[in-house]
């Protein structure tokens, strides 16, 4: 049986929206591992950005380099669920443009 290709998803989320985003991602199919769901890893960090004059930042000031506390969230999902998970992130995340990494993963079968 060929394993389903998986993607690692990494995002930064303000603490105030952490569980809203985590739950939205899980409901869209992220974080499923065998008989477990809602699997993720998160750790504190700092997000850095400079909004343009036309931006509408939730945190920070326009035309200024800002640093705000965020939580780095890491999870996985099957490749065929990536579009749904990304759409769920965009709906639940408070930022206009959340920083989002999608990384293809190797499986154990790739090393056999």
Image (cartoon, rainbow, N blue to C red):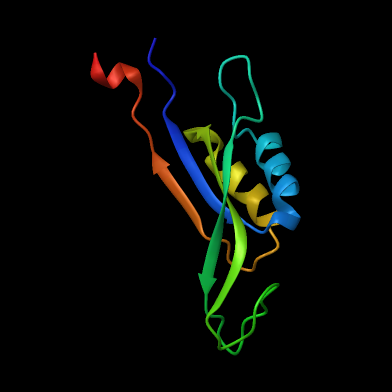
Quarter occupied by the N terminus: top left
Q: Picture quarter containing residue 23?
A: top right
Residue 98's place in the image compared with 102, above or below, is below
Query: Going 70% across and 49% down the picture, which residue do you hit?
Result: 18
Horizontal and vertical percent position of residue 63:
56, 88
Which residue occupies 27% across, 21% down? 110
**Image side of residue 13 versus residue 23, left or right:** left
- Residue at 38% across / 15% down in the picture? 2
Residue at far left of view: 112
Query: Which quadrant would residue 56 be assigned to in this image?
Result: bottom right
Please tell me whether residue 63 is drawn above or below residue 112 in the rendered image. below
Instruction: Give 99 or 72, whichever is nearer the viewer.
Output: 72
Image side of residue 21 versus residue 75, left or right: right
Q: Could you tell me which quadrant the C terminus lies in?
A: top left
Instruction: Please tell me whether residue 55 is drawn above or below residue 36 in the rendered image.
Output: below
The percent position of residue 72, horizontal first and vertical second, equals: 55, 50
Residue 105 % position (x, y): 37, 33
């Amino acid at each position: 049986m060929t394993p389903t290709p998986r993607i690692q998803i990494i995002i930064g989320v303000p603490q105030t929206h952490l569980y809203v985003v985590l739950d939205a991602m899980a409901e869209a199919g992220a974080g499923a591992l065998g008989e477990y769901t809602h699997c993720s890893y998160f750790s504190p960090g700092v997000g850095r950005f400079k909004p343009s004059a036309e931006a509408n930042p939730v945190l920070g000031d326009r035309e200024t380099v800002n640093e705000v506390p965020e939580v780095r969230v890491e999870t996985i999902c099957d490749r065929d669920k990536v579009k749904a998970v990304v759409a769920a992130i965009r709906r639940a995340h408070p930022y206009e443009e959340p920083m989002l990494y999608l990384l293809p993963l190797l499986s154990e079968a790739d090393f056999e």
